[in-house]
Image (cartoon, coloured by chain):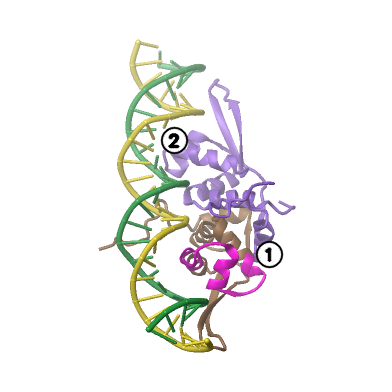
Chain colours: A purple, B brown, C green, D yellow
DNA sequence: ACGACCTGCTAGGTTTTCTTGGCATGTGCA
DNA sequence: TGCACATGCCAAGAAAACCTAGCAGGTCGT
């Protein structure tokens, strides 16, 4: 993204991409859209597993989906990558980290 | 980095940065080097926990350390960020994913 | 000797993530 | 009707990550 992401957004993107399956999903979709079952076959993983990974990728905004009807009437859900772009440097991380919502038990602060 | 990272390298970097504590560590070190105990106090986390995070960061090549002796003879381990830079786009991910060696990621040896 | 600093390690429990297998829905076609 | 294909969801075990508490070592100054 052109504007710097919030800490939480960056964290979600990083956590989402930090998985070999999801990395492959993004890589495969980068070469063209595909529907779930076909993608599962191409990647050699189960459909249930792929769906969970796609769910995470979509909730992180890295892929998007569109439910379409094939010519023979079957419902098929197509996924495609979004045009995301994140720069990972000490500086960009420093900027994002300042807006992290602390998941910290001890220093839990209340908005006064 | 300037040349495209391997899939495994990218995966390790992503997994390492996908943690709020480690994100804060990088952010803090980006403003200047620091030694472990001081960094732990500044971040408000235990030293043991910080050391584990620093270990991961260093093994991913995101920070580096140098053991130095303070003027009064105490050994202090200073950490600093490396000048890393990773671009995260569908294209760069597609390039990296082709060199992934982990469908089920079991590069660890069994404890015995 | 003691307290205040610095470092490093690890066993253990908790929490989160990952993965499988099953079951549900629906369509089209022989 | 039965088969092949598409979708979705969830329970529960397996695996990995996380964090704490406690141990060890060291130097310095009072």
At 57% from the left and 53% from the top, the residue drawn is A14
Q: Which of marks 1 and 2 is nearer the N terminus?
A: 2
In this rendering, the label closer to the viewer, 1 or 2: 1
Q: Is residue B52 magenta?
A: yes
At 46% from the left and 44% from the top, the residue drawn is A43
CB of mark 1 within 8 Å of CB of mark 2?
A: no
Q: Residue A91 carries which label?
A: 1
Q: How far apart are marks 1 and 2 (CA)?
A: 38 Å
Quadrant including the N terminus of chain B: bottom right
Residue B105 position in % (x across, y down): 40, 55
Mark 2, Cα crowd under 10 Å, few <14 / some 14-19 / many 20+, is few
Up/down of D19 relative to A67, above or below? below
Residue B10 position in % (x across, y down): 53, 60
Of residues A54 and A32, the one nearer the viewer is A54
Residue B45 position in % (x across, y down): 53, 62
What secondary structure prevails in the magenta region?
Answer: helix
**Which quadrant holds residue A49?**
top left
Mark 1, Cα crowd under 10 Å, few <14 / some 14-19 / many 20+, is some
Residue extending farthest to the left is B112
Up/down of A82 relative to A104, above or below? above
Please state the extent of the stretch shown in magenta in the rendering. B28-55
Q: Mark 2 points at which residue?
A: A48
Q: Is residue B2 visible?
A: no
Quadrant including the C terminus of chain B: bottom left
Q: Does the magenta stretch include residue A70?
A: no
Residue D3 position in % (x across, y down): 36, 22
Q: Residue A9 carries which label?
A: none
Instruction: Give me the chain letter of mark 2.
Output: A
Of residues A109 and A84, the one nearer the viewer is A109
């Amino acid at each position: 993204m052109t504007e710097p992401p919030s800490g939480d957004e960056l964290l979600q993107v990083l956590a989402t991409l930090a998985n070999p399956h999801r990395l492959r999903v993004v890589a495969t979709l980068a070469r063209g859209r595909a529907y779930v079952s076909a993608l599962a076959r191409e990647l050699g993983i189960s459909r249930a597993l792929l769906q969970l990974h796609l769910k995470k990728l979509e909730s992180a905004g890295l892929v998007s989906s569109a439910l379409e009807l094939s010519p023979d009437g079957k419902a098929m859900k197509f996924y495609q990558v979004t045009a995301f772009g994140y720069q990972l440097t000490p500086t960009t991380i420093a900027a994002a980290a300042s807006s992290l919502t602390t998941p910290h038990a001890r220093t839990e602060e209340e908005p006064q």
